[in-house]
Every structure is written in structure tokens, then in C-alpha cells.
Amino acid sequence: MKHGRYPFIIGFLIVPVAIYGTFVVAAYLQAFQLSFTNWRGFSPDVNYIGFDNFTKLFQDDTFWKAIRHHALLLVFLPLFTIVLALFFSFLLNVGGGSKGGRTRGVWGSKFYRVVFFFPQLLALALVAVIFARVYSPDESGLINGILNQFGSGPVLFLADKNLALWSILAVLVWQAVGFYVVLFSAGMGSIPTEIYEAAALDGATRGTLFFKVTLPLLWNTLQVAWVYLGIAAFDAFALVNVMSVDRGGPDGATTVLGLEIFRNMQDYAQFGYASAMGVVLFFLTITFAALTLRVTRRESVEL
């Protein structure tokens, strides 16, 4: 049986590994190769220019502007999303207090889980179109339409350089928070109710239950959530491409690396330069994930 196990496992793995190697690993290797060329996507001839693309890249103000935007998203997207998701999931699982010796969520918690998860069912492009109308500066915009009823002037959410990126960040949080509500709810559901009941008998308040019981037992889930959201912060291409003024505007106030890669490939036919950006984005993402897992590593809590 032991001799037949390995051919059986290999038989199941060979097809998905071959597909992954062809469409993922090979694509990465080709991007690395193109980053050292000046290929423009038309000629079959490829001229290698060494590190010239990377030298040009680190002297590009637009590139550094995109990096600063990613840094802002990297801090606030995970922070806002995780805080909101923890708050809502705690309400849905423990916020209803204790009844009959058992902790329970708020009334209608099962329905609220569906409501919170609903944005995950929408494509990002559709979410971008919806919120582009919500932020519209005229009376057809939901927010400005309400403000106009109170005599307030229109707020240029996407045309003001000081507001545009924050407005897109708010949409990213809105779209992501429902998934993490469900994720954290599943984590809280796996915590034995006896722990909450014992803490409640000792006089623990809801705040104490949250900070002293729930958070330590959800640490591994929080760690994974922070990594996923950090990777999402290095993307944001779809929302910025659809929602922003002049794709990344105004005046580059919302541009991100994904958008710059797309523009250099499609608009300027600089495939080598775009590939160099992709290589930098690849290493930034990998470095962030590795550092986050390393810094947040701690001993697991045994139940």
C-alpha cells in the first residue's frame, strides 16, 4: 500500500502543478526576463539593456508617488477593515450577552452575516461604478444629493487631491469588511463557549471578553487577515482605474503600481519598463508578507 501511495498522489498533482507552472511560474519568469529588455511588444527581437529599466524606475517621480499611496493603503486598509470586522463579528457572536448560561450574538445575527457578506458577491469593477455614482459631485450623487438638501456645497470626493485616495480607501474597506466578518465569526465560533461562560461568571465585561479572551484566541486568524489585506493594498487597480479622474488623477493623487504597469504596457508600449515595475511589486509583496508573518509570530494559545 505504501508503494502505491506515491504514484496515486503524483497522479492527482501532476495536472494542477503543470497548469500552475505554465500559467503562473512561467509568466513570472518571463516578466523577470523582460524587465532586463527594452522590448515594446511588437518586434520578435529582444534587446537586453541590463538594469537600465530599474535605474529609470527609481528616478521616476510617478513610481515613488505610487509607492507612497501603497504605503498609506498598507497601513489604513488592514487597520480599518480588521477593526470594523472584529467589532461586527464580536456583536454577531457574543454581543447579545448570555442567556440560559450560553453566550449569543445580537438579534438577527444570521441575517446580518448575509448582509455583510453581500459586497463580496459583486465584481470590483461593478463596485467601482456604483461608488463613482455615489461620489458624483452633482445632485445625482447619493452623498452630494443629501448635502444639497441641507444647503451644503458639493464635495469633490474624486476630484479633490486631498480626498480622492481616502474616498477610494473607503470603498476598499466597504468591499472587504464583510469577508472578514465571516472569517472572524468562524474563528469565534470555534472558541469553546465554556471559556466565555467561565469569564462571564468571573464578572468579565464585554470589553474584557473581547480583549482578554477573543483577541488572543483569534491571533492566527488576525495574522492571516493582515497579510491578505496587505496584499490587497498592493493592488487596488480596478477601483483606481474605474473611479479616479483621468486614471490615477487628479494629478496622480490616486495612482498605484498596478495602474502604472497597465498604462506603460497599453498606452506607451513599454513592456520592458512595465515588467520592471512588476518585478518591484512582486518583491514588495513577498517582503511584506514575510515580514508580517515574522513580526506577528507568537506562541499558539492552547484551548
Image: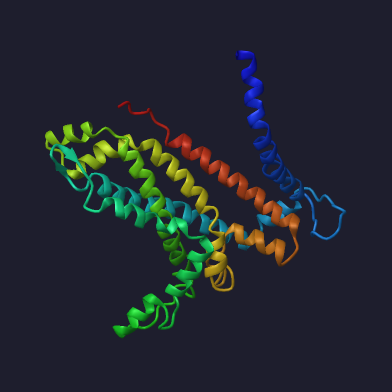
- Snapshot colouring: rainbow
**Residue 54 against residue 103 in the figure, above or below:** below
In this orientation, does residue 60 appear? no
Q: Could you say which is closer to the camera, residue 20 or residue 72?
A: 20
Q: Could you say which is closer to the camera, residue 154 or residue 113?
A: 113
Can you say which quadrant of the picture contains the C terminus? top left
Question: Residue visible at 57% across and 60% down?
Answer: 237
- Asked if residue 31 lies left or right of residue 252, the reply is right
Residue 141 point in image, percent of width and height:
42, 78
Task: Say which quarter of the image contains residue 206.
Answer: top left
Q: Could you say which is closer to the camera, residue 27 or residue 34?
A: 27
Question: Residue visible at 38% across and 79% down?
Answer: 144
Residue 30 point in image, percent of width and height:
74, 46
Question: Residue visible at 75% across and 63% down?
Answer: 269
- Single out the residue that lies furthest toward the bottom: 151
Q: Could you say which is closer to the camera, residue 80 or residue 131?
A: 131
- Asked if residue 36 lies left or right of residue 152, the reply is right
**Residue 187 against residue 107 in the figure, above or below:** above
Question: Residue visible at 81% across and 51% down?
Answer: 49
In this orientation, does residue 36 appear? yes
**Residue 202 against residue 280 in the figure, above or below:** above
Residue 191 point in image, percent of width and height:
29, 34
- Asked if residue 120 lies left or right of residue 16, the reply is left
Can you say which quadrant of the picture contains the N terminus? top right
Residue 192 point in image, percent of width and height:
26, 32
Q: How many marks?
A: 0
